[in-house]
Amino acid sequence: MKIGSLDVGIVGVGAWQAGGGAWEVDFAELRKAYEFVLDNGVRFVDTAEVYGNGKSEEFVGELVKSRPHVVVATKVAGFNWNKALKSAERSRRRLGRIDLIQLHWPPPFYVPLCKAIRELEKVVANGLAAEMGVSNFDSALMEEALTCPKKYDLVSDQVVYNPLQRAAERLIELGRRRGFVVISWSPLAKGAAVKESLGRDRARSMDSAVKRARSPEGRAVVATVRKIAEARGVSPASVVLAWHVAKGAFPIPGVKTRSQAEDVVAALKLVLTEAEVKEIDEASRAFVAGSLWPGVMRAIPGFLQKLAFALAKI
Ligand SMILES: NC(=O)c1ccc[n+]([C@@H]2O[C@H](COP(=O)([O-])OP(=O)(O)OC[C@H]3O[C@@H](n4cnc5c(N)ncnc54)[C@H](OP(=O)(O)O)[C@@H]3O)[C@@H](O)[C@H]2O)c1
């Protein structure tokens, strides 16, 4: 798959876990997991300035130094929409390079959208990133955002998408027509789409899909995924990642262990049949409706968002 000019393969990885704030991690194991994926066919890694206040970017920067084939994506926090250049400069110092710069969430309600997009455009114009995209924009906001850039295109929108949260499907359709890629965050619903027993990481308390997985409809989704995995002799996580590919999205799972990393690599070779995709679609039909996170964030002034993030330590 291509995100603008960037050749990204069919499955990437996300590195929020390396921020260490909202996730319980063993850093030695985490490093082994990311080294394994990036040395075995995965060529895209996502991070953000807010993950561990730069700690995740430092982790990714170390990893990609000796791996020039890896496409590096990061994000300017929504409250920094008017300081995108400065943010990107700091991020580039930690990462070494930025291929895709994304606005992490829409700017506060009192900011004209095009003003924020043009601030992002300056990052590309100044040679700090090759491509630009957004994150957490729903279809209506994305239609508006696509009218904003003067010189460079918006090539991606990173939103929540998994079998327990399918509200992004209208956006995927829009992306097909308008030439941008939907990058799926929390593609495994933080593990809830593939297993019953979950750790108590704080990140999970922020995600409604984790709760939904415990409903009868949610349990049916997990059971369907696990049934297909067993029949194909692969892991449930590989099945869900292959489902994303079939649906036209680009998943970026977070991994903590070498065994989870192996599941991501296995997904690169797994193609689901039409019948298998349909089975997961039918089991997860209840989760097509809904809205994308973080609608409510736009209502919060930027300085309060910044304070909330500093206190929340994600
Ligand atoms: N743009 C945004 O607003 C936004 C928001 C959230 C995330 N993201 C990005 O998306 C990436 C992925 O999202 P995410 O980390 O929230 O969720 P995810 O990828 O759906 O879930 C990751 C978690 O699932 C478990 N897991 C991973 N592989 C597994 C496997 N093979 N089998 C079973 N369990 C497995 C691991 O936790 P345990 O080992 O504890 O079970 C892991 O920490 C992030 O790293 C970040 O880059 C972006």
Image (spheres, rainbow, N blue to C red):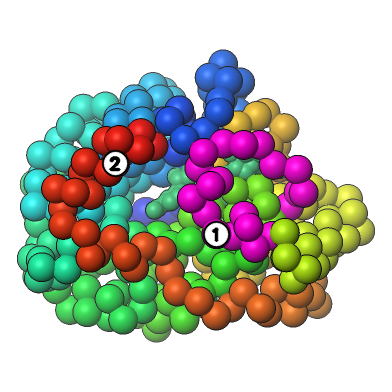
Please tell me in which quadrant of the rendered image residue 127 appears: top left
Q: Inspect the image, locate mark 2, and give the three-letter code of the amino acid beneath it.
A: Phe
Q: CA distance from mark 2 to mark 1?
A: 19 Å
Query: Would residue 44 be visible to someone looking at this image?
Result: no
Please tell me in which quadrant of the rendered image residue 216 appears: bottom right
In the image, what residue occupies the spot 55% across and 46% down?
204
Left or right of residue 117, residue 101 in this image:
right
Tag on residue 208? Answer: 1
Tag on residue 309? Answer: 2
246 above or below 79?
A: below
Left or right of residue 98, residue 83 in this image:
left
In the image, what residue occupies the spot 57% across and 67% down?
165
Q: State the image coordinates of residue 248 (x, y, percent, origin top left).
A: 55, 70
Query: Would residue 157 be visible to someone looking at this image?
Result: yes
> Which residues fall within the magenta stretch?
194-213
Contact, mark 2 vs mark 1 (Cβ under 8 Å)? no
Q: How many marks?
A: 2
Q: Inspect the image, locate mark 1, and give the three-letter code of the amino acid beneath it.
A: Ser
Q: Secondary structure at mark 1?
A: helix
Left or right of residue 201, residue 118 in this image:
left
Q: State the image coordinates of residue 65 (x, y, percent, origin top left).
A: 37, 24
Q: Where is the C terminus found, in terms of image quarters?
A: top left
230 above or below 271?
A: above
Q: Earlier in the sequence, mark 2 or mark 1?
A: 1
Looking at the picture, tell me which residue is in the foreground, 307 or 77. 307
Please tell me in which quadrant of the rendered image residue 271 appears: bottom right
Q: State the image coordinates of residue 182 (x, y, percent, origin top left).
A: 44, 66
37 above or below 176?
A: above
Q: Is mark 2 within 8 Å of ligand 1?
A: no
